[in-house]
Image: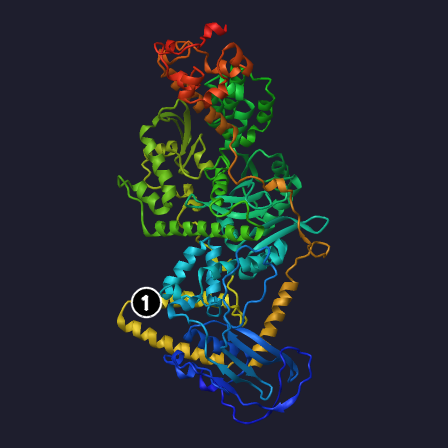
Amino acid sequence: MSDSNYHTKTDSQSVRKLNFEDEDSPLVIVEQPEPISIDSNDKIHANVEEEVIPKLGIEFETEQDAYDFYNSYARVVGFSIRRSKGHKGDKDGSRKWLDRVFCCSCEGIRGNDKRDDNVKCHRPETRCGCKAEMKISCRYSEKYCVVKFVSEHTHVLASPRKRIFLRSQRSINPAQAVEAELADSSGIAPRASVGLMARRVGGLDNLGFIPEDYNNYLRTRRTEEMKNGDTGGLLEYLQRMQSEDLNFSYAIQVDLDDLITNIFWADGRMKLDYEYFGDVVCFDTTYKKNKEGRPFALFVGVNHHKQTIIFGAALLYDETSETFIWLFDSFQKAMFGKKPQTILTDQDAAMAKALASQWPETHHRLCVWHMYQNAAKNLKEVFGRYNTFAGDFSSCVYDHDYEDDFLDAWDNMLDKYDLKNNSWLQRQFELREKWALVYGRKTFCADMSTTQRSESMNSQIKRYITYNYDLLRFFHHFQRLVDDRRFEELRADFKATQSKPSLEYPVEILKHAASVYTPAVFKLFNRELWLTWDCELHKEGEVGSVVIYKVISPHKSRQHIVQFDSLASTVMCSCNKFEFVGILCAHALKVLSLQNCKRVPNQYILKRWTKDAKVGSTMKNYMHVGPHDQNADVGSRYKVLLKLYSNLAARAALTDETFRISLDAHESTLNKVEANLKNLSIEESTVGSTHFKSKAQQANDNMQPTNCEGNKIKGIKLKGRQACVGTSRRRKGALEKATRKRKRQTKASSHIQQLTPEDSMRNLNTPGFTDMLNLTQEDSMGNLNTPGFTDMLNLTQEDSMGNLNTLGFTDMLNLTQAQLPKVGNQRNYEDVE
């Protein structure tokens, strides 16, 4: 405590006499008593600085200042304090503490516990009647003055290394609280976070709190968030995100009862990614990613590094066509009216209806993977009966360049397997333009024919989100996923600009492709170029400036027609790989090589696959940096200072001279900060806090958005409990189940084939496993004179040989023909018949 913060009081004044037993008793004006100081234990002050020891007459501005001063003294000495008796009254137009006593935490004796009959294990006794205390009063002055001080303790004081366990000496300061919240939102376990913070300050005893305090703080913070409910916390989160990023958009749909049903959101970076790579979108929903079991919908795409990126997300109440119509409309509005060229979904009828209504110009493609799943479910008998059906069905989906060839192959498949009257295939044929590649090859799909990118993203979500998260925690941890995906894109950008692919042969066209394409896309181009070596090329004829070639791919019977126009320097292949994927196919590259083309023609380089895919716009157009806010909270200021001083510490630690410079600057800065904080008057603090509170209250009042009729949102519409039962494990499709079943059957067949004749059931002269399962308990006990199958499994070797004079099922399998007659009263299979 500095001299400027306290003064010695010598004038004698009249004071009010305190009666702590009855606050309503009349106040009697008496002469000021002499201050009391009991300091008979000089040993505890032997190593304590003089300015730290409380003295009679020291004055403080506030009651909190007095508490902090006495607590600092208690920390040096080695004990904990607490607030004890006090009396409030009106003074200077406000109600404040007139008298206050701060005592040792061991003061007094524990009272009788009314739960004695019910509690088996009581807490240890911590109070031993200690008399140490400090009493302050402001009855006879404007400031609080120390009127009594007792330093003698009746218990053992804590040593310096043990003082961290004293309750009043433990606290989590605002900076540590922000760091704890950051660690929790990043998925870092409390133990790891506390360990890291302790290492920074040189150990747990220098941290200022213990791990239990850390866990209690996080639990308290979550409890406070629950007070507002999911609705208040969710809306507060969305509005905070919008205040940090002006391009953050969210849409909320409510029902007739003003309850939230559907939520959609997209930040500025998602919108920017959609501007560059939003030509193709995958859309899918997944379940059990939140506590209520709401369907979670993702709009995803692929960037120039062939990485999955997120364009938007939504939490839905159901999967009806009305819900999807609202969602697609909200997505389009958030993306400034831009619609995707192509969208891939599964075979959901509600999605198809909504897309036809909202985005009729968009090419709607069905996921081929889901096609196989449905085929395995609806044509299970056909797949099991014919081994060639899977290949023929796959050929209809992938292997045709012309519509006539596809129709002929489809009819041949129906005739071959007698499926002309199959209703499921008839329905799929009506939708052929959405799933057969012969109809979609001329539509750009960024090399995507399935929604596996959405499925893969759903799988990655499990690393960040569990199904028992509430909505607010779901949003926080989903943002972690988004941030990690963006970091991977940043890593890929760095590698693309700071390195180049290693070429096995320095071919000019490969050099040009490596300088233009990103490494991921260059691998695809390199593979196509290598395939040209095995392609057969035959000239078919010429029509004006157009030369027609026939190209045969290796190990394939299909032929592709390639047309090269020498005047326009264009090439066109019947496989339409460039139109579908965006890079030239091996057939076209074969013809270009024949024409001595050493570079990739500019008209066949899509900007979305190049290193300069994002050139033309800047992030600052989409990412908002808010203006300087005088009332910014401690957390925001702490994050800024932490980043700046972390960089300073890294640089200053390089040499001794820079280290000393930083220490001197730190001491000077710290003194200025402390002086500034101490000079803040109570009036300024009160005005500032009132102003901040009014703004916060105003923001809280405006937090609740309204529906179209201007009514306040009342809450979130909840789903039934059965929706969230189970785990977030992905359900197995019909194709996967059939594949697993086939593998098990194959494994069982191979195991049976490995058995020797002596191991077979007939050579054992005993019923087979299948026959035994069909026997009833009465048959097994009466006719066979042997225990049933269930009992036989439970018999030990001794029981089977001695008491029951029979063998368990497991032992019977191990017997050979020569060993079997040694067992008495064991009937063979012929006896049963």
- Image quadrant in which the N terminus is located: bottom left
- Judge whether 428 appears above or below 766 on screen: below
Name the residue type under label 1: Arg
| Residue 657 place in picture, x, y as percent | 27, 73
Residue at 55% in and 71% down: 631
Residue 754 lies left or right of residue 33; in this view the side is: left
State left or right for residue 82 relative to residue 820.
right
Q: Is residue 503 visible?
A: yes
Pick the residue in front: 305 or 27: 27
Percent x, y of residue 669: 40, 77
Q: How many marks?
A: 1
Tell me residue 59's x, y (percent): 52, 85
* Residue name at image x 28 percent, y 43 percent: 502
Q: In this view of the protein, can residue 618 be seen by the observer?
A: no
Question: Would you name the residue on which mark 1 appears?
Answer: 651
SS for callout 1: helix
User: Does 173 sit above or below residue 153?
Assistant: above
Residue in the foreground of this view, choosing between 335 and 372: 372
Camera-nearest residue between 803 and 367: 803
Name the residue rendered at 35%, 50% in the picture.
Answer: 495
User: In the drawing, does residue 715 fall left or right of residue 489?
Assistant: right
